[in-house]
């Protein structure tokens, strides 16, 4: 039981960063980015280049790759999404799918379809009583918690954080209060780019690096975000943890390969019963 | 070469059916279905499995159409009170789950081994060596029937209602019509077409396994609708038989271009589809075709 | 900004949505330190006028001048940096942020680095709105309508603007709260800021202003001292519904 809880928390933390990124971009741009799965894959491969091809230590490769990918995310926004900003949300949805397909196939072209792994030393798992925690899980735990803390501090206590929250809350008022929207949008893509690329590294550590890796995370990430109430970034983290733990405990009654079905059922139940999210009530809209 | 042409045309005809289905759901109805490939796969499996159990192919095809229509309707019901963003993720999730179930429930679907020996309809009708061309004729006939049906539907009062629901659901509700009802019916009819396309896929290859069905099917369909012009059935047909034909036809380049394997070529092809979608949405949002309706309504759709 | 009050001028402004003009060749000017109120029936283009003044809507032709400088080409953030503060109608606060954060956002993106500090301005503004001092840590969206208007005004005044634009400040308020709010507007005006007020409540609006403009169907029908507009029975009968 303790082991299931630990695994569930780690699975939830893996979802937390991309869910936070998705919710962040949604809150400011009102657009659900379906390319987020491909973003995750792309980040993982960029870091793979640094780590394996160029021989950097993983932490350095992860840092460099995350920043590089963040810049790429801003560039994609400029090229693909910005010209469509004034169209309907559905148009942006389809465009984001186009972006996803294009990115994923750039990766397939250069890296092929075979799975790869980061160059890290294999270490024995740590035992705490009867709970086992391997080094990858420990890394995930630490990286995600630190990243979440940083984002939370930025959100709560900095000028940049107030800027993003102001635009998410009331874009017109933010403009007349002197906030330039395009700058906020760029910051949002930078932050979510870093978060998604980092989560790509963590997923790659936890499993393999392969072109499909982000695709399998798309549904859980969306579900976690909807659980949190889609425009509420910090609640998305709570949604991710809830979903991770639920998926893990569901393995008691369902085969492991049906995790996705658990996710889907959670999402359907949620959409039918509480479409504003499990934790979404605090977002004041009236 | 002729065999190659026939094969490509058959694949294109099936893709055109998927495009027409999406054009009804998204082009006319404004409902994004990212899980097209799941519904298509379901159609293929229902038709394939029933046929190998001894059901006549046409009966199997009819069951596939009804089954997929019913499940499509259910998935539209799930997102009853929600915006299109949610429908997109629900359909995608549905498709992924379906693929998992088909991959792992080997007792029913033979899992990753796949279903072999699927019988085609009317396969004894054709003289020896003409089986493929005969099947192409069936596929083209199906495209024709679906096209005619959808054209009729687009011009009918129901077609107007569907477009009105897309352009302004509030007005439709105010007129006392149920938007949910329209959405569910649009999804069901689209689902029936997807079931038909999937069934034809199973018949054509006579063998199906889960790896044949992926988001690429969805990507082709969106490409066909965006190029053809949302809402224009003729546009979808034209873009399917030109663009998808070229894309599919590029498979034969494997024999001529050195250093590029089949998977690299597939990656390039899909990269073009992805970038093309974005570029078209930016620079040619109405595509190259035109929705069959009055000019006033056409004007309002350009602001989509 | 921070200097003496600046004037605001519109010259032959035509503006609207989707190529359809709503405002037809509007011209007026507000002298530095003066209060001008725009009144007129529903649908006369008052909100469009306000959006054009603050830069949320670009005019199709004509010019907007702020303190003598042509700002027609500038967007809302740039105009805010030049000392134009705007309080929109109703949704005029960040509802999911605390009152203090609202005041912070009001200050930090507009105020010049050499001007008064945040805490100096906070004290000054809380002096004008003592009612919200106890609410600084509350989520702004949970306040009452009257308190929200106070927060909106306070946030707009944080950077010490030279021109304040108010869009229907009394909308959604009870008559009593509207009266209280206009008392506060009087206090703010006394501090020397130039004011442009769009108001549906003609009695309250004109009572707080120096000059009045009657806007009907996107045309300026009358521009006169507020007292004249308010008391002249002929004007009231013709343009303001005759009550």
Image (tube, helix red, strand yellow):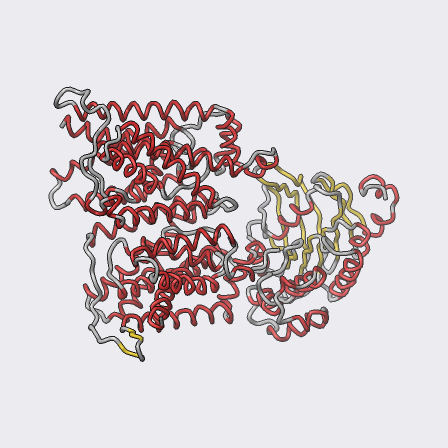
Name the residue located 58 percent from the left edge and 65 percent from the top edge. Answer: C97
Is the N terminus of chain A in the top left, top right, bottom left or bottom right quadrant?
Answer: bottom left
- For the question of whether residue A168 can be seen, the reply is yes
Is the C terminus of chain A in the top left, top right, bottom left or bottom right quadrant?
Answer: bottom right
Q: Position of residue C197 (x, y in %)?
A: 72, 54
Q: Is residue C102 left or right of residue B202?
A: right
Give the vertical position of A184 relative to B267 (above or below). below
The one nearer the camera, B110 or B168, is: B110
The one nearer the camera, C191 or B39, is: B39
Name the residue located 29 percent from the left edge and 74 percent from the top edge. Answer: A132
Name the residue located 61 percent from the left edge and 33 percent from the top edge. Answer: B175
Name the residue located 33 percent from the left edge and 30 percent from the top edge. Answer: B62
Q: Position of residue A267 (x, y in %)?
A: 43, 53
Give the vertical position of C235 relative to C191 (above or below). above
The quarter of the picture where residue C27 lies is top right
The quarter of the picture where residue C241 lies is top right
Q: Position of residue C93 (x, y in %)?
A: 62, 60
- For the question of whether residue A42 can be seen, the reply is no
Q: Is residue C69 left or right of residue A270?
A: right
Q: Is residue C163 left or right of residue C110?
A: right
The quarter of the picture where residue A71 lies is bottom left
The one nearer the camera, B191 or A4, is: A4
Q: Position of residue B19 (x, y in %)?
A: 35, 34
The one nearer the camera, B105 or A44, is: B105
């Amino acid at each position: 039981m303790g082991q299931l809880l630990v695994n569930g928390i780690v699975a939830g933390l893996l979802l937390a960063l991309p869910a936070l990124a998705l919710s962040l971009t949604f809150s400011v741009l009102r657009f659900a980015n379906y390319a987020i799965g491909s973003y995750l894959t792309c980040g993982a491969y960029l870091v793979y280049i640094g780590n394996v091809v160029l021989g950097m230590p993983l932490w350095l490769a992860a840092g460099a790759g995350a920043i590089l990918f963040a810049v790429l995310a801003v560039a994609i926004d400029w090229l693909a999404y910005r010209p469509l900003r004034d169209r309907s949300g559905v148009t942006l949805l389809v465009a984001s799918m186009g972006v996803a397909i294009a990115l994923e196939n750039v990766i397939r072209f250069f890296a092929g379809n075979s799975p790869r792994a980061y160059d890290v030393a294999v270490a024995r798992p740590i035992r705490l009583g009867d709970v086992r925690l391997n080094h990858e899980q420990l890394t995930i735990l630490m990286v995600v918690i630190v990243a979440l803390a940083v984002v939370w501090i930025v959100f709560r206590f900095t000028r940049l954080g107030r800027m993003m929250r102001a635009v998410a809350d009331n874009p017109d008022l933010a403009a007349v209060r002197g906030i330039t929207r395009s700058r906020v949008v760029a910051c949002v893509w930078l932050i979510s780019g870093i978060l998604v690329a980092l989560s790509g590294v963590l997923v790659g550590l936890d499993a393999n690096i392969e072109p499909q890796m982000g695709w399998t995370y798309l549904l859980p990430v969306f579900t976690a975000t909807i659980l949190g109430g889609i425009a509420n970034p910090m609640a998305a983290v709570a949604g991710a943890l809830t979903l991770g733990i639920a998926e893990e405990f569901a393995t008691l009654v369902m085969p492991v390969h049906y995790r996705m079905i658990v996710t889907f059922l959670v999402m359907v139940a949620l959409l039918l019963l509480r479409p504003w999210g499990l934790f979404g009530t605090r977002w004041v809209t009236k | 070469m002729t065999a190659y042409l026939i094969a490509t045309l058959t694949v294109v005809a099936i893709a055109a059916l998927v495009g027409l289905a999406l054009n009804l759901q998204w082009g006319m109805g404004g409902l994004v279905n990212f899980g097209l490939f799941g519904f298509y796969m379901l159609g293929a499996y229902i038709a394939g499995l029933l046929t190998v159990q001894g059901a006549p192919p046409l009966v199997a095809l009819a069951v596939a159409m009804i089954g997929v229509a019913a499940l499509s309707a259910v998935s539209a019901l799930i997102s009853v009170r929600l915006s299109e963003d949610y429908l997109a993720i629900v359909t995608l999730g549905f498709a992924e789950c379906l693929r998992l179930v088909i991959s792992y429930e080997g007792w029913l679907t033979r899992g990753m081994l796949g279903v072999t020996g699927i019988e085609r309809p009317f396969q004894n009708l054709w003289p020896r060596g003409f089986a493929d061309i005969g099947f192409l004729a069936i596929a083209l006939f199906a495209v024709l029937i679906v096209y005619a049906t959808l054209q009729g539907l687009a011009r009918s009062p129901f077609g107007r209602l569907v477009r009105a629901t897309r352009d302004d659901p509030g007005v439709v509700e105010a007129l006392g019509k149920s938007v949910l009802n329209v959405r569910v019916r649009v999804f069901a009819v689209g689902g029936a077409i997807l079931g038909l396309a999937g069934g034809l896929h199973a018949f054509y290859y006579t063998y199906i396994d889960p790896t044949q069905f992926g988001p690429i099917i969805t990507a082709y369909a969106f490409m066909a609708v965006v190029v053809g012009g949302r809402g224009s059935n003729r546009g979808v047909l034209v873009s399917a038989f030109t663009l998808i034909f070229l894309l599919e036809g590029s498979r034969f380049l494997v024999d001529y271009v050195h250093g590029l394997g089949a998977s690299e070529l597939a990656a390039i092809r899909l990269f073009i589809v992805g970038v093309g979608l974005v570029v078209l949405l930016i620079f040619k949002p109405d595509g190259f075709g035109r929705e069959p309706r009055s000019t006033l309504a056409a004007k309002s759709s350009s602001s989509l | 900004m921070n200097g003496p009050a600046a004037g605001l001028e519109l010259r032959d402004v035509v503006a609207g949505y989707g190529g359809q003009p709503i405002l037809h060749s509007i011209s007026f000017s507000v002298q530095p330190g003066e209060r001008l109120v725009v009144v007129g029936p529903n649908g006369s283009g008052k909100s469009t006028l306000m959006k054009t003044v603050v830069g949320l809507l670009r005019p199709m032709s004509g010019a907007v001048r702020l303190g003598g400088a042509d700002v027609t080409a500038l967007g809302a953030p740039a105009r805010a940096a030049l000392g134009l503060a705007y309080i929109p109608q109703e949704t005029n606060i960040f509802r999911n942020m605390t009152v203090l954060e609202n005041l912070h956002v009001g200050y930090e993106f507009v105020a010049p680095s050499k001007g008064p500090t945040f805490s100096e301005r906070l004290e000054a503004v809380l002096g004008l709105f003592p009612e919200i001092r106890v609410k600084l840590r509350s989520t702004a969206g949970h306040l009452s309508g009257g308190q929200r208007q106070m927060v909106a005004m306070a946030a707009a005044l944080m950077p010490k603007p030279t021109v304040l634009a108010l869009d229907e400040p009394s909308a959604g308020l009870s008559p009593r709260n509207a009266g209280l709010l206009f008392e506060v507007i009087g206090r703010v005006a006394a501090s020397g800021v130039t004011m442009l007020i769009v108001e549906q409540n003609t009695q309250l609006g004109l009572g707080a202003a120096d000059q009045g403009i009657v806007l009907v169907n996107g045309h300026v029908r009358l521009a006169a001292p507020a007292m004249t507009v308010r008391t002249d029975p002929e004007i009231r009968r013709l343009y303001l519904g005759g009550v």
